[in-house]
Image (cartoon, helix red, strand yellow):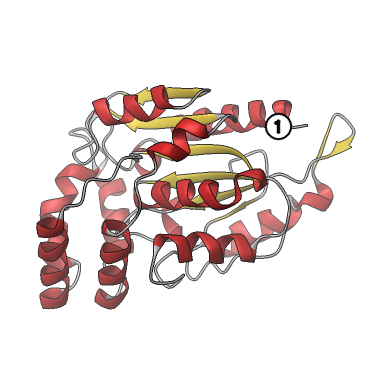
Amino acid sequence: MKAVPAGKSQTMAALIATMLWSPAHRFQDGARVDMHAMLLHGFPLDGRMWDGQTTALPIPTSAPTLYRQGESMAAWAGNLLKAADDDPLVVVGCSMGGSCALEMARHAGDRIAALVLVGAKAEHRPEPDLRDRYVTALRAGGVRQLWSDMAGCFFGPVAEPAAISAAEAIAMTQSAEDLVRAVEVFHGRPDATDVVAGWRKPLLVIGGDQDGFVSMRKLTAVAAGAPHGRLHVMRGCGHFASLERPAEFNAILANFIRSALDAAP
């Protein structure tokens, strides 16, 4: 697996763990396994949101930052696919990252062994007024202009303050230019309900029932729309379940990846 540019997304510990668990050293039942997990972050964070997952999964991981991968969701997906070799991918996408995961599946489904969508929806209903409001706020004062309104939707009512602070710290390092691009890319994405309907490999939807951005109805619709879709609800969690309850999230994701390994040809 070629390295995917991660920007600030990987700590030294994660890099060392990735090398130790590189495909050349990963075996299951005596057979070499080259599957790789690509973790795609949500807005307005970056690959560091996955620091609690990069060393906790049974296969190697990468956590690229998306904002400078191009000017459209198709460009983001294409550039990520170019950065990877032909090893089967488990693509895990949170929110905006979930949209990118679905676009990767649209363009190169044969290279993807399984999909995990975290707080992500497949349908796209254009919301130009919301897009323009976000862009205006970002250009006026960066992410701080939006954070106070958004934070209440990102986390459930009993989220640990440390998890909220960690997310805020990541968000505050993002440039307004990058986040404006992300808003425009996200709001210009294609509808992906057809991708879900045609996806005949494992697909897991993970969602919090306190998500202020994506309703349980929409999460349920994604899982129900896939021939082999499954839904796991994390009670009391908001939009960023992996940050809010990492141990529980890691167990869910690791079990799903193991089942994908078992199902791989």
Relative horizontal placement of residue 7, taking residue 81 as reference (left or right): left
Secondary structure of residue under mark 1: helix
Quarter of the picture holding the C terminus: top right
* Picture residue at 25% right of the left edge, 25% below the top: 217
Instruction: Choose top left, top right, bottom left or bottom right for residue 170.
Output: bottom left
Is residue 142 shown above or below 152? below
Query: Across the whole image, how many numbered discs are drawn on residues?
Result: 1
Is residue 191 shown above or below 204? below
* Picture residue at 61% right of the left edge, 33% below the top: 257
- Residue 200 x, y percent position in the rendering: 58, 29
Q: Give amino acid for label 1.
A: Leu
Judging depth in this view, the residue of 102 and 230 nearest the camera is 102
Q: Which residue is mark 1?
A: 261
- Residue 249 x, y percent position in the rendering: 45, 33
* Picture residue at 30% right of the left edge, 23% below the top: 235
Relative horizontal placement of residue 140, taking residue 105 as reference (left or right): left
* Picture residue at 60% right of the left edge, 60% below the top: 81
Quarter of the picture holding the N terminus: bottom right
